[in-house]
Amino acid sequence: MAECQECPALEAAWWEAESGGDKAKAAEALVTARRHWRSHMAEAEGAPA
């Protein structure tokens, strides 16, 4: 996970949307980041991502 190139970009997109005040965009970015994070957790548990 530490070497993942997508994680920082997804987190930055969420922070940008959150700070911009667009609740819909922030929610979408958060869901996308969580979905990506869950793929890491599935890989760690041995399940296919």
Image (cartoon, rainbow, N blue to C red):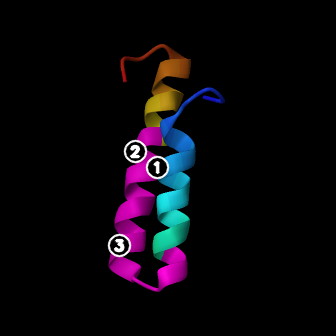
Q: Residue at x 45, y 73 (%)?
A: 17
Q: Quadrant of the C terminus?
A: top left
| Relative to 35, residue 47 above or below | above
Name the image quarter holding residue 48.
top left
| Relative to 30, residue 26 above or below | below
Q: CA distance from mark 2 to mark 1?
A: 4 Å
- Mark 3 neighbour density, 10 Å: few (under 14) some (14–19) many (20 or more): some
The residue indicated by pointer 3 is 25
The answer to whether residue 9 is magenta is: no
| Local SS, label 2 | helix
| Local SS, label 1 | helix
The residue indicated by pointer 2 is 35
Q: CA distance from mark 3 to mark 1?
A: 14 Å
Q: Which mark is residue 34?
A: 1
Give the mark toward the camera: 3 or 1: 3
Whole-percent x, y for residue 12 in the image:
54, 58
Could you say which is closer to the camera, residue 42 or residue 16? 16
Q: Residue at x 53, y 42 (%)?
A: 7
Q: Main secondary structure of the magenta part?
A: helix
